[in-house]
Amino acid sequence: MKFVPPPRSRNGAFSFVEAIFTIAIIGLMSSIVVVAVSNASRDANRILARQQQAALQSALNGWIMSQMRDPSTGQVISVEQIRATYNGTSTSKARLQLFVTDQPGSTSYLDDISTEEFLSHTDNSDRIESLALEQAKQFLTLPTWNSGEFPKVLLNDLP
């Protein structure tokens, strides 16, 4: 006697349970991809914010070094005098204006693109802002330069 398999009742289609299971797996995989892409965007903005902080710190350092000698007399200027000039401006935006300028022929210690980005987005005089900082929910400040320290550019989170 020869074994004959029973006739198949299926016509090759998915059952309802198989279809639901497949849809659930695809949904889970797509949610993982969406989370990974959104985290990558946030991380990129945070990296750019750190780079902008470093560029502003470098510009501040350049401005301080350039202030060490009076260009007309060549005399050395004390750090206390430079600190007094820096602290004489009371807001972060005013301090930013010390070492960036939009005047042709004047020395700027920050590149033109970064200068434009900071000046066009900074409305609040206590915060230095840019598009990348806004997207990262952060801002920069130039706090008071205390004696015995070097001035710092601080990266802060928005409240």
Image (spheres, rainbow, N blue to C red):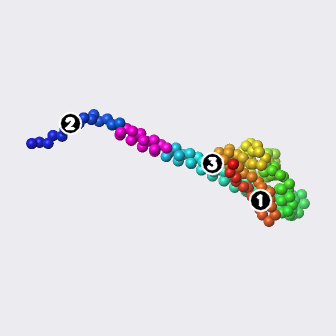
Chain-order first, disc 1 or disc 3: 3
Query: Which quarter of the figure is the N terminus placed in?
Result: top left
Q: Marks 2 and 1: in contact by CB < 8 Å?
A: no
Residue furthest front in the image? 17
16 in the magenta segment = no
Residue density around tag 1, few if under 14, some if 14–19, many if 20 or more, within 10 Å = some
Question: Which residue position holds label 3?
Answer: 45
Question: Which residue position holds label 1?
Answer: 151
**Residue 55, can we see it?**
no
Q: CA distance from mark 1 to mark 2?
A: 85 Å
Q: Name the residue rendered at 31%, 35% in the picture.
A: 13
Q: Which residues are magenta?
A: 17-31
Q: Name the residue rendered at 41%, 39% in the picture.
A: 23
Amino acid bearing label 3:
Asn
Chain-order first, disc 1 or disc 2: 2
Amino acid bearing label 2:
Pro
Foreground mark, 2 or 3, reads: 2
Q: How many marks?
A: 3
- 62 or 151, which is in the foreground? 151
Question: Which residue position holds label 2?
Answer: 7
| Residue 19 placement: quadrant | top left
Q: CA distance from mark 1 to mark 3?
A: 25 Å
